[in-house]
Structures are given as structure tokens and as C-alpha cells.
């Protein structure tokens, strides 16, 4: 059997992920399903077990899981060149599409027709987030302890605690609880207890003085977000609202919803929402810096974790930490859904549209991109003719 040249394999990675980055609608679960079909079943790049190991590793580190799967699969197929090619080619088409929408939004977003369009889209986005939250709850909440952690995270988030604090606090809480006997045997209890007070600070105590906008701060904020966001891409909303609305005042809740709408309507990773926010705050340079900032940690983490794939998820410590992080992330997601719902559902029309969208999602499994388009058209028609 003839061995393929490395450059040929890199070309295969480029072709596959440019294709998926252009057509992969529907969120991370849909993206991963398409990667499984292409890389595992059709092309035979990896076995079923190896694919599951890579997926487990992607879930165990911060960042967008579907993008990290593209990076992992590229690395598996073509080494370091494949690592870079897989991630960049999956992100690039979505970033360019979001850039186009961002320009249109900045140029025409204040015009009445654009406002009416977004009036119909925002309730649909709320319904999409609720449906994603429900699916994640079914798959991630494994027992009463994780349910309690999620509820506690929700309450503390609504009380003003920072998203980063709650994410890592949830992971540490579950990890320490499940491995309490190991901590006692290793005399590590004092270390854990020393960490917990710092994790209990409300955001008002750790946020500091709001910053004036500048590109360096924008890059560093997205670099931080890309380094700590676990779970669904929708958990990103908690961090966006935390930093850009609550702490810095650079965006409004309405603009965050608009950013989510753009991210939902376009293919590829939901994290390209960063491209939109970067553009409306800092133009083209802001868009590029925000995109690099939020995705760079994924490349670095995949490179670091790749040799350990298949070991981490089987270890009780990181596995328990991941379960706790997932529970806390869902609590944050529920809190943000409530806050954004309050901003989007302002009258009987938007409430009705959200309920109908939820029915279409839960009962008929309609693709969310079509629902976003329909919501925009209905909102435009409602405002223009009624």
C-alpha cells in the first residue's frame, strides 16, 4: 500500500475543513456529527474509539469543542501542519461571513428596516438558547449533586458573581467532593479550602475599574474568555455579558443578542460571535484581534493535551472537574437566558414568536438557521404592515 506524502494529507485537511466551515450549520453537536461522518466513516482517518477519545479530550479543555475537534483531527491526520490547517480552515469561512454581516450591521443596523428585522430575530434566538439548554441538561446533569451545583451557580450568577469564578468553583467543588477521601489521605484539604474563599467573591469585588476601549484590552479579554469557557458555545453568552455589558459597558444587552443572532445564522463555530463584537467595537483590526484572541488558546491547549488523549477522561480527578464545570456552565447559561429573555420578550408579539419557535424546535426539530431567517422576515412584515 502506497503511503501518502505529508503535503497530500495537509491538502486533505484543508479541503475537508474549508468545506465544513462553509456548510456546517446547527451548532457544535451538528458540527461534530458531520466531522464524524466525514473523518471517521467516509475517509477512515480515525477509528470510532479514537474519535470518541478525541471528543472526550475536546470536552475536557476550555474552548469551542467543535473547533477543537477540527484541530485534533487535523493533527491526527497531518501532524503540526494539520493542526494549524484544520483549525484555521474551519474558522476562516465563518469569520469571513460574520465580517460581511458585521459591516452590514454597522452601516445599516440603525435603519428602521434593520431594527424591525432584529425585532423578530431576537425572540427566536431566546427559544434556540432554551432548546440548547434543555438538551445539555438532559445529557450533562448526572445526578442530584450536579443539579444542585447548577442551581447554585444560577443563583450566584444572578447575585452578581463572576462567570469565571463560578465555572472553576463548580469544577473544584465536584472534584473535591467526589475525591474527598483522596484529599484527606493526601492532606490536600487545606489547599482546597484555601482556594474556595477566593472563588466566592462577587464580580463587584474582583472586576476593578472599567477600562476605556482599546484594541489591546479587547484582545486580552477574548484571550481570557477563550482560555476559560467550558461547555456549549452558548455558555459564551455569560462571559460576553459579564465583561462587555456589566463590567465595561462597551455593549448593551441588545447588541449581545444581535451578536448571537449573527453567530447563529452563520455556519461554523458559534465563537465567531467574537468577530462580530470585535468589528462593531474596533473595526477590521478589532475583528481580527478578537477572533485570534478567542481561538488561540484552543490551538495551544490541543497541542499540549494531544499526547494525553484517552487518559484524561478516564482519570477520576479531571473527569469529576469536567462534570462540575458542565453543571456550573449550565447554571450560567440559564441565568443569561433569563436576562436576555427579559431584553428580547417585550410584548405579546415577541413572546408569541418565542413560544412558536420553541414549539418548532422541540416538536418538529426545524433547523435553527431557518427559524432565525423566518423570525427576521416575520418581524419585518409585522412592523411594516401592521
Image: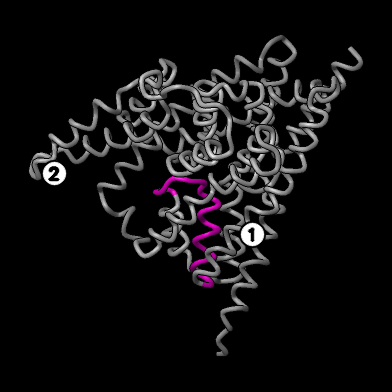
Q: Nearer the viewer, mark 1 or mark 2?
A: 1
Which residue is at a point 22% across and 38% down the rendered structure image?
178
Does 172 appear above or below 186?
Answer: above
Q: Residue at x 13, y 34 (%)?
A: 190
Q: Give the image location of residue 42, x and y in percent.
A: 62, 68
Residue 35 placement, left or right of 93: left
Q: In the figure, is residue 260 to the left or right of 319?
A: right
69 drawn magenta: yes
Q: Position of residue 28 (x, y in %)?
A: 57, 46
Quarter of the image for residue 195 reads top left
Q: Which residue is located at x 41 percent, y 24 percent?
A: 207
- Give the residue displayed 54% in from the left and 18% down from the top: 338
Q: Dot 2: within a 10 Å radius of its alpha carbon, few (fewer than 14), some, or many (20 or more) residues?
A: some
> What label does residue 323 carry, if any?
none
> Would residue 312 appear left or right of 36 to someone viewing this image?
left
User: Helix, strand or loop at disc 1?
Assistant: helix
- The residue tagged 1 is 89
Q: Are marks 1 and 2 in contact (CB under 8 Å)?
A: no
> Looking at the magenta stretch, what is its main secondary structure?
helix
Q: Residues within 10 Å of mark 1 (few under 14, many from 20)?
A: many
User: Which image quarter holds the N terminus?
Assistant: bottom right
Please report whichever mark, 1 or 2, sits nearer to the chain's N-terminal start.
1
355 vs 225: above or below: above
Q: Which mark is residue 182?
A: 2
The percent position of residue 48, horizontal first and vertical second, equals 48, 64
Find out whether residue 95 is within the magenta segment: no
Quarter that holds the C terminus: top right
Provide the residue span drawn in magenta: 59-78
State how the image is colored.
one colour
Q: Nearer the viewer, residue 348 or 309?
A: 309
> Label 1, label 2: how many angstroms apart (C-alpha)?
44 Å
Amino acid at each position: 500500500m502506497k503511503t501518502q506524502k505529508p503535503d497530500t494529507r495537509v491538502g486533505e485537511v484543508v479541503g475537508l475543513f474549508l468545506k465544513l466551515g462553509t456548510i456546517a450549520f446547527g451548532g457544535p453537536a451538528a458540527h461534530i456529527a458531520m466531522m464524524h461522518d466525514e473523518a471517521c466513516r467516509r475517509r477512515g482517518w480515525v477509528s470510532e474509539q479514537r474519535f470518541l477519545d478525541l471528543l472526550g479530550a475536546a470536552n475536557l479543555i476550555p474552548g469551542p469543542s467543535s473547533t477543537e475537534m477540527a484541530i485534533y483531527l487535523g493533527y491526527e491526520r497531518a501532524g503540526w501542519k494539520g493542526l494549524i490547517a484544520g483549525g484555521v480552515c474551519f474558522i476562516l469561512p465563518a469569520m469571513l461571513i460574520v465580517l460581511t454581516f458585521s459591516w452590514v450591521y454597522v452601516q445599516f443596523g440603525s435603519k428602521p428596516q434593520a431594527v424591525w428585522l432584529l425585532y423578530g430575530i431576537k425572540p427566536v434566538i431566546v427559544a434556540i438558547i432554551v432548546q440548547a439548554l434543555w438538551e445539555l441538561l438532559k445529557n450533562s446533569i448526572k445526578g442530584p449533586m450536579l443539579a444542585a451545583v447548577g442551581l447554585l451557580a444560577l443563583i450566584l450568577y444572578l447575585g452578581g458573581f463572576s462567570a469565571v469564578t463560578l465555572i472553576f468553583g463548580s469544577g473544584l467543588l465536584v472534584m473535591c467532593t467526589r475525591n474527598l477521601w483522596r484529599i484527606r489521605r493526601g492532606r490536600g484539604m487545606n489547599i482546597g479550602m484555601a482556594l474556595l474563599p477566593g472563588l466566592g467573591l462577587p464580580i463587584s469585588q474582583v472586576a476593578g475599574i472599567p477600562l476605556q476601549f482599546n484594541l489591546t484590552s479587547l484582545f486580552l479579554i477574548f484571550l481570557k474568555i477563550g482560555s476559560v469557557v467550558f461547555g456549549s458555545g452558548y455558555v459564551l453568552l455569560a462571559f460576553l455579558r459579564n465583561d462587555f455589558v456589566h463590567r465595561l459597558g462597551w455593549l448593551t444587552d441588545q447588541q449581545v443578542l444581535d451578536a448571537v443572532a449573527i453567530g447563529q445564522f452563520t455556519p461554523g463555530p458559534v465563537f465567531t460571535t467574537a468577530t462580530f463584537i470585535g468589528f462593531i467595537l474596533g473595526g477590521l483590526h478589532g475583528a481580527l484581534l478578537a477572533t485570534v484572541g478567542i481561538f488561540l488558546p484552543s490551538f495551544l491547549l490541543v497541542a499540549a493535551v494531544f499526547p494525553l488523549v484517552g487518559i484524561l477522561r478516564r482519570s477520576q480527578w479531571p473527569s469529576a472537574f469536567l462534570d462540575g464545570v458542565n453543571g456550573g456552565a449550565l447554571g450560567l447559561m440559564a441565568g443569561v437566558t433569563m436576562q436576555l429573555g427579559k431584553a428580547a420578550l417585550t410584548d405579546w408579539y415577541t413572546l408569541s414568536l418565542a413560544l412558536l419557535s420553541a414549539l418548532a424546535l422541540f416538536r418538529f426539530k426545524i433547523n435553527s438557521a431557518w427559524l432565525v431567517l423566518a423570525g427576521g422576515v416575520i418581524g419585518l412584515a409585522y412592523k411594516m404592515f401592521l
